[in-house]
Amino acid sequence: MPERTISVLRELDADLLCLQEVVNAPAQAPLFDQAGEIARALPEYTACFGANRPLRGGTYGSLTLSRLPMLAWKNIEITQRREPRGVLMTDLSLGANETLHVFNVHLGTGFMERR
């Protein structure tokens, strides 16, 4: 279970959290169901997950957590070179017909990927 991550997220007390390099493998041990464990530990948030590649009987990608109401979310594949990459786009309601578009992006460290 990702206790340290959950502890830090609780300390932050943010309305919006964007995490990368999260494992989402519900059929595996808690260590490999990071997305599920984090979401269950923080019930005040709505969670959405964007899978970028398979890993350990599940998937690996980005997790967005929000206290604001989620209207929609979509993971967009943006792979250019080596490792699969994605952008988890989430639309959040700010009330009164206002929408906040959030982009949870995890880029590679290589020059060509960031270019």
Image: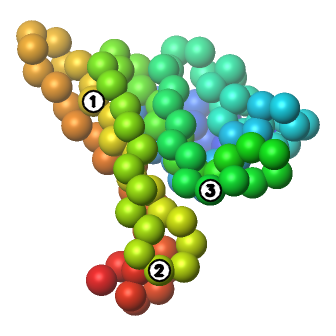
Tell me which residue sits at (55%, 54%) in the image. 52
Left or right: where does residue 14 sit relative to residue 99?
A: right
Amino acid type assigned to the residue bearing label 3 in the image: Arg
Residue tagged by mark 3? 53
Categorize mark 1 by other alpha carbons within 10 Å: few (<14), some (14-19), many (20+): some
x%, y% of residue 80?
41, 75
Amino acid type assigned to the residue bearing label 2 in the image: Arg
Categorize mark 2 by other alpha carbons within 10 Å: few (<14), some (14-19), many (20+): few
* Residue farthest toward the top in the current orientation of the protein: 96
Residue tagged by mark 2? 81
Find numbered disc 2 in the image and state the secondary structure of the residue it sits on: loop
Residue tagged by mark 1? 91
* Residue farthest toward the bottom in the current orientation of the protein: 111
Label 1 – label 2 distance at C-alpha = 28 Å
Label 3 – label 1 distance at C-alpha = 23 Å
Amino acid type assigned to the residue bearing label 1 in the image: Asp
Q: Earlier in the sequence, mark 3 or mark 1?
A: 3
The residue nearer to you, when weighing 38 against 15, is 38
